[in-house]
Structure formats: structure tokens, C-alpha cells
Amino acid sequence: MRAPRGFTLLELMVVVALIALATATVTVGLRDSNLTRLETEALRLGALLDAARAQSRTSGVPLLWQPTETGFRLAPAGTGTPADPPPRSWLHAGTRVEIAQPANARLLVLGPEPLTPPQRLELRLGDARLSLASDGLGPFAVVRDTP
């Protein structure tokens, strides 16, 4: 009677194929989608806008927020234009934002009044879209757009 001496080539190839398949599945599952990246940008921007409104309320000076090609600018009103401070960049290249509300606005005025008009920003990254909105009283919140 012969004792088993190891694995056959076929058994080893099956194991290697299973490991490759599992690795590919995990890699695809962990890939950061555009929507996830856009949500990160929106949460970051929402926190910044809420903090700017709070700062404006405590200082009594309105802050102006303006989108740029690669990011945005934030500056106190009355110090010239929002172009005075250096712009902040988006975390993910290719992110675009437009002011949807108030209509035809080129910049957002944040504070110092506790109640401001409703404000809404449309963010896009690739084919992903979502909105960041405030009713003027509450904080900015992420709103998913339906295609």
C-alpha cells in the first residue's frame, strides 16, 4: 500500500483559481465609487458651510462662499471679493458644483442672521450626482438626486 505523497497538479490549480477569484471579488467590492467620493465631498462641504454660518453668527460678519473650477473660496463680506483668500481644492479631482438655490446666484451668503433663504448646491463627479441643501434654518444635509 502506497502512502499519499501530496497534492495533484489539478488540485493545486483549483486552489490557485479560487484564491484569484476571491481576490478579484474583494478588490472590486472595495473600489471607491464616484457616488461614495461625492458623498465624502458633500459631507465635508456641508460641515464647512455650517461652521461658516456659525462663525458668521458669532462675529456678525457674513461669509461669502463661491465655487471655482477646482474647488471653492470662502471669505468674509466687505473684504473685497471672495477671490481674496486662496481657493480650497476638492478632495477628488473632477468634482463640480453649481449653486441651484437661490436661482442664478454666483455665491452663497452665509449668515449672520439665524434664518437665511433656502440654499442648495448640486454636486457632480463623473455620472454621480447629489445635492447639498439647507432650508435656511437647519444644517446642510446631503440629498440624493434621482436620475
Image: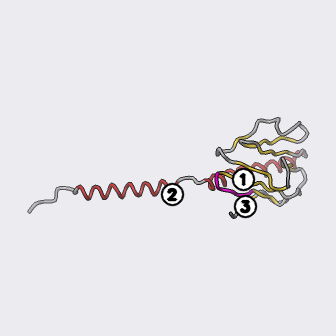
Q: Locate the C terminus and report the quarter of the image it occupies.
A: bottom right
Q: Earlier in the sequence, mark 1 or mark 3?
A: 1
Residue type at numbered disc 1: Leu
Q: Is residue 130 magenta?
A: yes
Image position of 34 (left or right of 116)? left
> Dot 3, how many residues are within 10 Å of its Cα: few (below 14), some (14-19), or many (20+)?
some
Residue type at numbered disc 2: Gly
In the rendering, at what x and y percent does residue 81 appear?
Answer: 86, 38
Describe the colour scheme in one phrase: secondary structure
Cα distance between the residues tagged 1 and 3: 10 Å
For the point 22% across and 57% down, the residue is 8
In the rendering, at what x and y percent does residue 141 appear?
Answer: 75, 59
- Judging by the rendered image, the residue that carries numbered circle 2 is 29
Cα distance between the residues tagged 3 and 2: 24 Å
In the rendering, at what x and y percent does residue 37 appear?
Answer: 63, 52
| Secondary structure type for disc 2 | helix
Q: Residue furthest left?
A: 1
Question: Mark 3 touching mark 2, by CB under 8 A?
Answer: no
- The dot on residue 123 is 1
> What secondary structure is the magenta-colored segment mainly?
strand
For the point 29% across and 55% down, the residue is 13
- Looking at the image, residue 118 lies above or below residue 80: below
Residue range in magenta is: 126-131
Q: Earlier in the sequence, mark 3 or mark 2?
A: 2
- Judging by the rendered image, the residue that carries numbered circle 3 is 143
Q: Earlier in the sequence, mark 2 or mark 1?
A: 2
